[in-house]
Amino acid sequence: MITPNVLSKKGPLFKDKLYITRPTLPSLEELTPFMQEMLEKRWVTNFGDFHNQLEARLKEILGVKYVLLCCNGTVALFLLIKALKLKGKVITTPFTFPATVHAITMANLEPLLCDIDPDSYTLDPARVKEAMSSEVSSILAVNVFSNMCDVEALKNIADTAMVPVIYDSAHAFLNSYQGKRVGGFGKAEMFSFHATKLFTTLEGGLITTNDKELYNDLKNLRNFGIKDEERVTGVGLNAKMSEMNAIFGLLNLKKMPEVIKKLSFLHAEYRQRLSEIPGVKFQKIREGCIPNHQYFTIEIISKEFGMDRDKLHNILKKDNVITRKYFYPLVNHYECYKDIELTQNRQLPHAEKVSERILCLPLYYSLRHEDVINICELIKGIHYHTKDISNIVESLKSCVTV
Ligand code: T4K
């Protein structure tokens, strides 16, 4: 057990800040020949060779008929929603990153938030079923922290209502469920390849689908709606991925098996060590899901742990462990949505509770095994010393957010 810096005053446990994530990146040596080739060809964007190679590799790995690389996940999701020509309301979750709900709103549709399951943190199908009406044109579900949604139940609800389910799988690249790679569920899925994601192209996103017509519409929308040299048939955007981003992708893709192996090991270590502490709850991974382990989150049940999530977050910060409250606040509490009825008077008790308790801990490829052990021992020390700490917490309220 390690006594936290707020009590020991010995200085932070970690000399350098430990963030929740750090990108896995290729070395300059690995990058150089690719960059040289790109510079010699003088082809830097607009569906160059590297872009096309990356699309071909992803299509093969994910086992889907069509893939479209995009400049980022948010724009990819927005284009997907536009291409589906949805109307009225789109059911989604409040427990997500702003991008999910903003993509709906930016497409002039109304997000309709339904509560989550308190253990998996994914949309609760029972709440979705209650919220279905003739005004709902789609369900946008999020495979949060690389857990899978209840895809079977959501499919049944959507099929009955004859509306598509689409997945925000920003966190779920290279996951599989019931032996099938994520990417082939629902009408289409979106992935994020941002710097903070398991697999990064620095900025980037991907849409996967098995629907040819949707693919053709998306291809058009991704490139200004240009059909050919003389025809512009859609109101599209510039959502293309550049060659530089694709090069990072090609090089990083090779590293994925090794990265996932290490994350899985660190994940298990965290879980085993933290399970000894009262008041620490873990996300329940759906049976049949093999997650990529890109996030490690805990819920802090304050009565049992001895303090609430916010205090733990601030105390860890004093030891240079920079945790994040993903996802707090919930979407329905955002200032930009305060005048909009997102829930149709439905309560979101589970999402509210998880959002108040959740804490995302550091987890990434270059994180050392001993760092995970020390973080766990520090959390044990904080739990053990809750009474001593409670006397000084007032002074911690002024901690600056990092
Ligand atoms: N749907 C869901 C469910 C999502 O979670 C996201 C994005 C999206 C859609 C949209 O996908 P994109 O349009 O982004 O492709 C980060 C990411 O920016 C965002 O991509 C991600 N989800 C979200 C969960 O996390 P912030 O604002 O919390 O990131 P930031 O800048 O605080 O970075 C977090 C930590 O990562 C830093 O403390 C240190 C580390 N970091 C970050 C960057 C940018 C690095 O080590 N290097 C870096 O270059 O949103």
Image: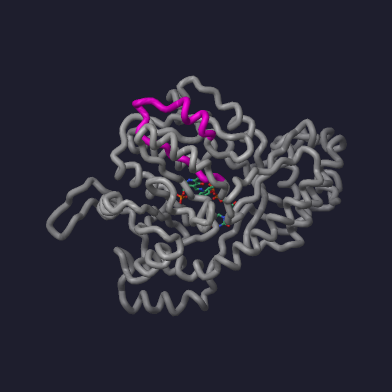
The foreground one among 240 and 296 is 296
Residue 272 in magenta stretch:
no
Relative side of 229 to 148, left or right: left
Q: Position of residue 113 (x, y in %)?
A: 48, 30
The residue most toward the top is: 345
* 209 versus 348 height, above or below: below
Q: Is residue 337 left or right of residue 242?
A: right
Q: Residue at x 86, y 40 (%)?
A: 385
Horizontally, is 34 left or right of 398 in the view?
left
- The answer to whether residue 49 of the structure is visible from this angle is yes
Q: Residue drawn at (47%, 25%), measured in percent from left and top?
A: 130
Vertically, is 264 above or below 394? below
Residue nearest the observer in this picture, 353 or 194: 353
Residue 164's spot in the image, x, y percent? 37, 40
Where does the image place residue 161, in percent across and percent down from the top left? 37, 32
Q: Relative to 179, say whether 115 is above or below.
A: above
Residue sitting nearer the eye, 337 or 157 = 157
Magenta highlight range: 124-144
